[in-house]
Image (cartoon, coloured by chain):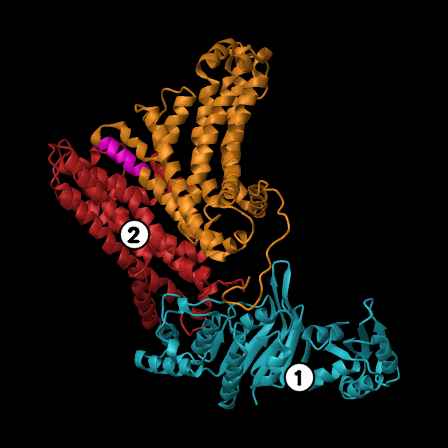
Amino acid sequence: MSLLLEARDLSRYYGQVVGLNDLTLSLEPGVVGLLGPNGAGKSTFLKLVAGEIRPSRGTLTVLGHVPFANPDYFRLIGFAPQQDAVYEEMTGLEFVIFLTRLSGHREAAARARAEQAIERVGLADARHRRTGGYSKGMRQRIRIAQAIAHDPRFLIIDEPMTGLDPLARAEMSELFRALAVQGLSILISSHILHEVEALTPNVVLVHRGRLLARGPVREIRRLLTRQPRKVEIRARDARRLASALLESAVVSSVRIEADGVRLSLETSDLERLCSDLPALAGRVGAGIQTFESRDASLEAVFDYLVT
Amino acid sequence: MPALPATWLFFRTHLERVAWSRRALLCLALALVPLVVAASVTAGSARVSPGELATTVGAWLLLQVLVPLLGLIAGSSAVAEEVEDRTISFLFSRPIARPTLLFGRLGAILVFLSLLLTLSTLGLLWIAESARGSGPILDDGIRWPLLWAVLAGGVAYATLFAVLGVFTRYPVILGVLYVLAFEALLANFPSSMQSWTVQYYLRSLILSGGSGAWQLIESFDTLEVESALAALRTLAVIVAVALGLGAWRLRRREFVLPS
Amino acid sequence: MKATTHTEVYRRFQGRLAPARLRCLPLLAAGVRVALKRKWPLLLYLPPFGAMLVLSFIVYTKFLLEEGLAPAVLTPAGANPGTQVIGSLAGTLIEVHTIVFWSVFGMGQFALLIAGWYGAGLIAEDRRRGAHLLYFARPLSKLDYLLGKLGVVACFIGAGVLVPALAIALTAVFAAPGWSFLTEHGSIFLDILLYTSVHTFVLASFMLAISSLFKRWAYAVVTIAGYVLLSSGLANLLSWLNRDQSWQVLSPTRCLWRLAASIFEVEQVVGVRLDWSPALAWSGLGGVVALSWLVLWLRVRRMESVA
């Protein structure tokens, strides 16, 4: 199978600021999540892949093409950028038709494709309204519509879930799954792990312009399980709970906070702790009020991977 | 998409956009100013002749002020507005040759501007006919040179400011500097430096082929000008070179937009 | 007390507000600080300060020549026998108040560019980015907001007009023997302050009014330039056609020139018609200021109510 994307020593600098630094990566066709905290270099990478900017160093080929300002390449891709920008005086339908026509389709075909794409993103009712009057979520969806209307082979989407309510996010995920089933390769960037996880098992993690990890999410999570997990518990009788927890084999350390009701603990097996904790707390009458895993976020994953 | 259909699509879309925008109303209002001035002078004064009215308003108001101003307002939006609105990402991720954006949108701007300037000039000439004073008459030596100079000026200024938008994020401020400072200064310097301004060639178009009435305008009487053909040729070269540079730059330029 | 749209209870404020202070000052300071972050627009001050150096040198030379001396830079070989003649000519031909007039006359053009750069976006960008929502969620009155913004643009205009004029006058004070310039022509400082205050206030008010009409600073700049060009063109045209220089009142720039000539007692200026009444110039400028503040008040009131 030919590669979707191949990057070697890919770097991009903005003056003194490093956007990407020596990224070497190859991706196969399919759905790939590009993950990283804010400022990691995700958008820079996507802009390079979308052919908006050139690399400062290194090489990048996507679908066998060098992306920058390459009309042959643009026939094959659909790009939905992150910025909240649309042609405000156009209706949603006009907006998508215009851009679909620029992809080489005639008026009638562009209209039919635009209608279909708008239907797929759930904006059929609002297609004759000016985009200037759209909500943020609607603008996001119309940007997705323009990216898929011309049937690209490869879809590049920067932060697609921004501005969407939970229901719309679920619909959007469903749309991407359906597109993937049709054979479309998708590269989605996000800083929210569980959203991308719901779409694809394959992720690429970037941090400070560098490649941190890539591969299935499970493997990355397994990296996390080698590190103790931090948990915070608020209980009526924190001291009793603390002494009971210290007897557990999966708890490596417990600290009682200054207010006397909160516990911070480290555990090597969060799942086992969660299953043992109710019985343990009931036995000592601790009265657990809140339970919070402090490092389920992507930032925590990165902390572990970086340190 | 092939270059010609893409250019036509940009042309058509932008013409619709420009024609129905608030900017069009502003341009229309500005284009009517010479007519209002001419009408008020005609109504209020029995001293001013048709030729004097047409030449004075045509040279001082239309050619020196409104043509550069309308060129700036209309021309600077060709590419710079897409960058400022951050919609250029959509356009440049399509299979089109990038210069088609410049050519298509500039074409629409030139059509719009030419219509507006023609309306303004013909309106001015029509109103000036009814001036009651004795003096130079309004003949073809005034009409045609003024019309050609106004149209040529509109094309030249709009093109220059449109191309400026390809090179910089601030075409408006540079355009204002050019019109208010550069041209205003150099247009009144000895002749060799005047030839660095567009106004010099527009004045050449008027003076070399036109009626003696133009010589009555203050500061026009001492000008050394080129022939109309040479002036038109120079303006055409300026426009062609600007477009060439703009197309070249647009192909290579990266548009790094803030998120 | 219950709000009609919510089930929350709104508690009455029971504290004490701090006494009102000049809230425009923090706004002014912040505006100037932000404007100075970009260094290259300071190049706009190059011509005014260059001219200031040249004109100050001329004034300095005048007093030296009057005393029978010549500046070393003009006479490297030693005292020139013609210095006495030149000195008496310098005394009669070079008047300090005329030099100051030329300073403010010339700097006025650059003041327009400076005001355009620093002032055109002050309110326009606030509207565009929604910053007015933040401002008016604070205890900031319309007047505070306007004075703060006015102060920002006035600082930059003042630096371009007031500083060169003051520098020239101070050069005369120190160059003249025995403080004679100060004792005989000390009122020039009041004239400078009067003129530059009027110039700055008129220009700043006008800039802000135009800025308040748009959401893009570029449109504001074009409108300002257009108004200046158009008003000057119209003033010249109607004056010529009607053989009546009173029509110069249509142009704020011409009004400022007329005012400067009147304040600094200059009777003739090459290329500028002064055969019209200064009272008309005052009226013209008064009209511009009144209209500007009316526009500003209405626009800011609207911004405040939207916020």
Q: Which chain identifier belongs to the orange chain?
A: C
Residue B223: x and y in percent read 28, 35
Point out which mark residue A215 bears. 1
Measuring 42% from the left and 44% from the top, which residue is drawn there? C296
Amino acid carrying label 2: it is Cys
Q: Is residue B182 visible?
A: no
Residue C264: assigned label? none
Chain of the residue where label 2 is placed in the rendered structure: B
Residue C236 is one of the magenta-drawn residues: yes
Q: What secondary structure is found at the residue carrying circle 2?
A: helix
Q: Is residue A162 above or below residue B19?
A: below
Q: Check the rendered structure and report the hue given to chain A.
A: cyan
Location of mark 2 (residue): B27
Left or right, C215 with respect to A157, comes to: left
Above-or-below relation of A221 to B79: below
Figure chain in red = B
Magenta part of the chain = C232-241
